[in-house]
Image (cartoon, coloured by chain):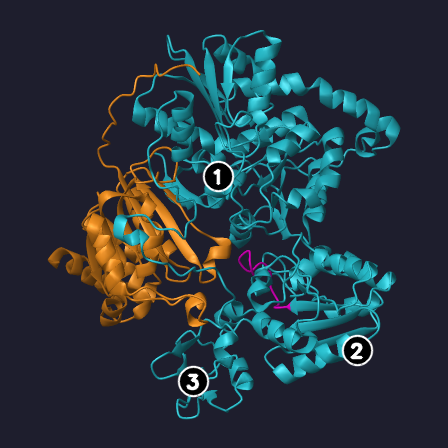
């Protein structure tokens, strides 16, 4: 009897790791990958080691150590995390592994929660590492045990690349068994493998190249790559990963007779592609982001002298940007068959409306914003008061990037970059004061290096560490400043202030952003300080505080005293609205009782709700 | 180009398939609403696919969940593909109309969640009567205040379960199975309130 459960894609992936006999798991949080470690860390009956690492490079190396000890390990991250971990990863491909190692790297086509939409399949190609590209959450779960075995068979790390719609999709999932027998750790001292001196690296490069064909042949036989030749069909479709199910659904819906090649693992199965190309006149390649498969198809057609027309991204039939869907497949198909385009409204923006009368309605945008009572809003308010408009505000990646609405986020490049970009601005000769903002987790991730560099090279800037005692944006994961690990076990609580002082910062101060006077004084002193100054704005994330049982008395506006000046409304807290009829501000049930608006009000019109 | 030689057959009508879109605002409980329906589909032995908004959009942003009962392939509803839209907030009914099929059903909670862009004066909120009027031109509309019904059931936070009750008679899943799923997924202490919320939502739509 099979068991089926309704699961989030990332929970299904976590289940796959259990079914694959996982022994060591590491990762750094990043949407859409975070729930994999969260799920595994929350399990009570763990027979594996698990950690949130401080960044992806470190996480990768922890997984490598485990794999070199002969056990099965996984490292999880979002796509841009692999940029951080690229250094160990590229050379790991040469060294290889003993125990199976899966690098789960979740892509985010359409940048739902990301700064770019790079395609991790390119990294796999670049590193000569196999890549698994699941098309459904069920397939994602089923691929993982296979991927562990594949990794061990070829002694190669593998990439497993879900996209947002796999990781954050949900599905009924058929479960498999979880093994109980696992290999013991035993580090074999294979110095020609684990010491990548030039004399060892050269033959390993030869080796990696030599096994590419064997890996490809094995994957051509795997269920993830499959060719369905439709007798007599002169048109073929090649769908990769999640795009393959969009293509499949559209073809089934239309009843089109086409041969179909589904690609779910790389290196691409050249044998299957050639077999398809030999039977058709034209193929449409449908894959999200980069034309990885399409380029291979074109090369194979050329090498084999097959006169097949290849439709895809390189000739404008499929977009190279964003997510694909059933509609984009139908559009591509329509172009291929030169069907007249439907005269539909090109409503690209989600803010535009469809429907006849509905089109006329102007919708108010609803961007995500900082929560009611979020301490970042107060920090940014104080920062803006002290540094003013005539200052430069480099920022970083986290909830606080939403501070763009406060006018204090003027650069965001990658994790940890606020401080180093700020240093560069300063050394370039920028004369305005520079005030950076970076979260606690992002500071531990890569901001530390940037601060060390700023101090060492004498950048006269202010660095604000927004210490909300959590990794907020990705769903509240712990970090080294909190005193406990991924599994909730107590550990050392690293002091941000002591850390900054130890790196040589001449000015370090901690202030409570809920106390506007205190935080403004801290900013004033930092601004005057010659050299790299650090302000640590410390106040727990309001969501975490609420969950931990912190209850503050909510605030209310006294309509008698309110002058309707809107200073509190401009603060931008979602709990503060303005009654246009009565011309007074109103505080709603969203109020968490931080009390910052009461300090902003010049008329003493805001106070705690009286019981 | 290769000419138009493809055989375009009739679209197959699938037995128990139902595409549902849930729209709303981060924090309203859209994910729990989809989970109740998703888990119920599994109990009923139906294949199910869903796609959710996590991350950035959770912080008071606009959210949309796709739920495909009876689907074996992808989780994304094609444009003009949804049989029904369950809108937890009036303006969010309009934002995703591209996904609703012509003549489809919209169930709307008429209680507003005012976005920061409106409270801070950068934008204005369209009148709810105008929203409902516009929706009625092309779709079957069932509109009521689900927050008030939830309060009547015992807790305003049960608004999402009121809305699940409201959509329940349209789904290819029995009421009993949906209630079993509600009981399994809401906090144990709130089962009674949520069952009542479900019933109130179901009655409201059936009587209108």
Q: Which chain is orange?
A: B
Which chain wears cyan?
Answer: A
Q: Which chain carries label 2?
A: A
Q: Read off the magenta span.
A: A467-477
Mark linked to residue A528: 2
Front in this rendered view, residue B96 or A76: B96
Q: Can residue A44 be seen in this view?
A: no
Relative placement, left or right, of A30 versus A279 is: right
Asked if residue A476 lies in the magenta stretch, the reply is yes
Residue A323 circle label: 1
Q: Where is residue B48 in the image (x, y as percent from the top left)?
A: 33, 40
Residue for point 53% across, 8% down: A307
Q: Nearer the viewer, residue A544 or B148?
A: B148
Helix, strand or loop at label 2? It is helix
To which quarter of the image does residue A80 belong? top right
Chain of residue at mark 1: A
- Going by the image, does A446 lie left or right of A39? right
Mark 3 vs mark 1: same chain? yes
Image: A263 above or below B195: above
- Where does the N terminus of chain A fall, quadrant-wise? top left
Checking the image for residue A556, the label placed there is 3
Residue name at image x 83 percent, y 25 percent:
A202
């Amino acid at each position: 009897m099979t068991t089926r459960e309704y699961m989030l894609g990332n929970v299904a992936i976590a289940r796959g790791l259990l079914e694959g006999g996982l022994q060591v798991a590491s990762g750094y949080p990043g949407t859409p990958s975070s729930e994999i470690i969260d799920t595994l860390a929350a399990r009570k009956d763990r027979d594996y080691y698990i950690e949130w690492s401080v960044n992806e490079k470190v996480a990768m190396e922890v997984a490598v150590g485990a794999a070199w000890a002969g056990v099965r390990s996984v490292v999880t991250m979002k796509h841009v995390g692999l940029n951080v971990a690229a250094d160990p990863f590229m050379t790991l491909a040469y060294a290889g592994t003993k125990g199976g190692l899966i690098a789960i790297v979740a892509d985010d086509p359409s940048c739902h929660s990301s700064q770019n939409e790079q395609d991790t399949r390119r990294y796999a190609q670049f590193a000569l590492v196999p890549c698994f590209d699941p098309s459904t959450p069920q397939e994602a779960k089923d691929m993982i045990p296979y991927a562990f075995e594949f990794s061990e068979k070829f002694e190669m790390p593998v990439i497993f690349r879900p996209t947002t719609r796999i990781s954050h999709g949900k599905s009924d999932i058929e479960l498999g068994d979880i093994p109980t027998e696992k290999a013991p750790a035993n580090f074999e001292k294979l110095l020609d493998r684990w010491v990548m001196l030039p004399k060892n690296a050269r033959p390993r490069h030869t080796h990696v190249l030599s096994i590419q064909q064997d890996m490809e042949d094995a994957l051509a036989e795997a269920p993830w790559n499959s060719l369905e030749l439709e007798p007599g069909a002169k048109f073929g479709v090649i769908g990769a990963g999640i795009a393959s199910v969009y293509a499949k659904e559209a073809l089934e819906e239309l009843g089109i007779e086409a041969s179909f090649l589904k690609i779910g693992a790389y290196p691409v199965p050249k044998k299957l592609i050639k077999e398809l190309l030999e039977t058709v006149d034209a193929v449409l390649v449908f894959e999200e982001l980069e034309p990885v498969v399409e380029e291979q198809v074109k090369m194979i057609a050329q090498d084999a002298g097959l006169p097949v027309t290849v439709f895809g991204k390189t000739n404008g039939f499929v977009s190279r940007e964003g997510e694909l869907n059933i509609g984009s497949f139908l559009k591509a198909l329509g172009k291929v068959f030169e069907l007249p385009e439907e005269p539909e409204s090109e409503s690209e923006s989600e803010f535009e409306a469809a429907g006849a009368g509905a089109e006329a309605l102007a919708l108010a945008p609803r961007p995500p914003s900082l929560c009611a009572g979020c301490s970042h809003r107060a920090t940014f308010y104080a920062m803006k008061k002290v540094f003013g408009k005539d200052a430069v505000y480099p920022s970083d990646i986290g909830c606080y990037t939403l501070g763009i609405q406060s006018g204090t986020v003027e650069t965001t490049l990658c994790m940890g970059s606020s401080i180093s970009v700020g240093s560069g601005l300063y050394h370039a000769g920028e004369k305005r004061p520079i005030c950076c903002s970076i979260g606690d987790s992002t500071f531990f991730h890569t901001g530390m290096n940037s601060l060390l560099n700023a101090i060492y090279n004498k950048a006269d800037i202010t660095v604000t560490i927004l210490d909300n005692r959590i990794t907020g944006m990705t769903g509240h994961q712990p970090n080294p400043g909190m005193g406990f690990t991924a599994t909730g076990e107590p550990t050392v609580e690293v002091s941000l202030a002591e850390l900054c002082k130890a790196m040589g910062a001449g000015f370090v101060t901690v202030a409570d952003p809920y106390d506007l006077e205190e935080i403004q004084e801290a900013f004033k002193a930092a601004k005057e300080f010659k050299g790299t100054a650090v302000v640590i704005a410390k106040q727990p994330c309001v969501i975490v505080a609420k969950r931990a049982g912190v209850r503050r008395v909510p605030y209310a506006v006294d309509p008698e005293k309110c002058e309707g000046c809107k200073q509190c409304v401009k603060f931008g807290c979602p709990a503060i609205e303005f009654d246009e009829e009565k011309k007074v501000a109103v505080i709603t049930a969203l109020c968490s009782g931080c009390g910052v608006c009461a300090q902003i009000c010049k008329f003493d019109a805001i106070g705690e709700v009286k019981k | 180009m290769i000419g138009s030689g493809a055989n375009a057959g009739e679209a197959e009508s699938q037995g128990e398939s139902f595409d549902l879109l849930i729209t709303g605002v981060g924090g309203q409980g859209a994910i729990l609403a989809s989970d109740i329906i998703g888990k119920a589909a599994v109990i009923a032995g139906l294949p199910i696919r869903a796609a959710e908004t996590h991350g950035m959009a959770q912080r008071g942003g606009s959210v949309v969940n796709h739920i495909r009962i009876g689907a074996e392939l992808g989780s994304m509803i094609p444009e003009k593909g949804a049989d029904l839209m369950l809108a937890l907030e009036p303006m969010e009914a309009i934002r995703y109309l591209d996904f609703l099929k012509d003549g489809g059903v919209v169930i709307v909670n008429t209680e507003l969640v005012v976005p920061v862009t409106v409270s801070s004066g950068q934008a204005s909120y369209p009148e709810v009567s105008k929203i409902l009027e516009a929706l009625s031109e092309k779709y079957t509309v069932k509109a009521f205040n689900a927050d008030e019904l939830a309060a009547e059931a015992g807790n305003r936070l049960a608004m999402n379960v009121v809305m699940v009750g409201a959509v329940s008679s349209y789904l290819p899943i029995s009421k009993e199975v949906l209630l079993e799923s509600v009981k399994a997924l809401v906090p144990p202490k709130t089962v009674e309130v949520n069952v009542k919320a479900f019933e109130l939502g179901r009655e409201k739509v059936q009587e209108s």
